[in-house]
Image (spheres, grey):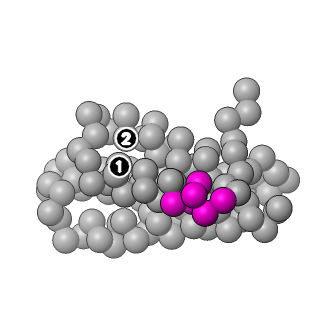
Amino acid sequence: MNMLATVRTVDARESIFGRLHALIAARAASPDSARVEARQLISMAMADSWQADSLWGAADAFHAHFDFMMQTIEINGADDPNLRILRTKCRFYLEQVEALCQSLS
């Protein structure tokens, strides 16, 4: 089953970043549920292509930073000053995924 979708419109892009912001702002029921939601965000931003290695590399970097961010929230709370850097890195890697997808269109 192919769960990959290309980001084609500004509305979809805003929806992805809106969901990322909401996911970061809300305390997930568990780290696993947050990971599932994060994987869905990547699936929304990723295209099925011959550049899958590059796309999955950016996706894996996103997930690594996202997991670390969720662990930081769990340990230090949502007011931890280091979260700003982690949020920025999550957004950066999600943008990289999107840019790779758009370069394939």
| Residue in view at x 61 percent, y 63 percent | 10
What range of the chain is rendered magenta?
9-14
Query: What x and y, as percent, mark residue 73?
Result: 22, 53
Q: CA distance from mark 1 to mark 2?
A: 7 Å
The quadrant of the image that shows the N terminus is: top right
Tag 2: amino acid:
Ala
Above or below residue 43? Residue 103 is: below
Tag 1: amino acid:
Leu
Q: Is residue 100 left or right of residue 87?
A: right
Could you tell me which secondary element the residue under label 1 belongs to? helix
Q: Is residue 92 left or right of residue 86?
A: right
Q: How many marks?
A: 2
Residue with the mark numbered 1: 23
Q: Is residue 67 left or right of residue 104?
A: left
Above or below residue 21? Residue 86 is: below
Query: What x and y, as percent, mark residue 33?
Result: 37, 34
